Image (cartoon, rainbow, N blue to C red):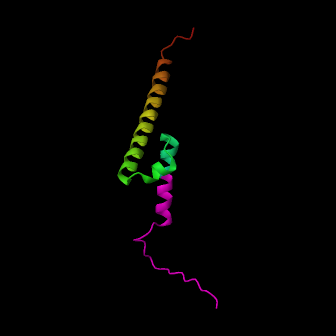
Amino acid sequence: MKKVRLIYQLDLRFFGLTFENKDIILEQIFLLMQHLGFSYLDAYRLPIWKRNWFLGRIRQNLEQQIEMQQSKIKSNSSQGIFKKTF
């Protein structure tokens, strides 16, 4: 007797993660591993609120670094305007 595998097209996702959710979680885990040196299991086992806090903190640090770089570029370019060239 041949076994038949049934595929249900119902949209019941209450008890499981969709592919999109899995992709988001893996992206979060990757960022924690890349920027903070977490192991995969440590990042995976973090409660969601802690994982979100760490990711928010990474974003805040990166934004501060970008602002500092932009202010350095602006200050360096404004200093060159008033230099004598002779």
Residue extending farthest bottom: 1
Q: Residue at x 45, y 38 (%)?
A: 62
Residue plotted at (45% across, 23% down): 75
Residue drawn at point x = 51 percent, y = 13 percent: 83
> Residue 51's x, y, as percent?
40, 49
Is residue 10 found inside the magenta-colored segment of the image? yes
Magenta part of the chain: 1-27
Quarter of the image where the C terminus is located: top right
The furthest residue to the left: 49
- The outermost residue toward the top is 86
> Does 70 sit left or right of 2 as displayed?
left
Which quarter shows the N terminus? bottom right
Residue 76 locus on image (x, y percent) = 49, 22
Nearest the eye: 40 or 9: 40
Q: Nearer the viewer, residue 13 or 46?
A: 46
Residue 6 placed where, x, y %? 55, 83
For the residue pair 52 and 15, the one nearer the viewer reads as: 15
| Horizontal relation, residue 53 to residue 42: left or right | left
- The residue under the point 47% across, 67% down is 18
Q: Main secondary structure of the magenta part?
A: loop
Q: How far across and down, in percent of the image, does residue 42 sit?
A: 46, 48
Q: Quadrant of residue 2?
A: bottom right
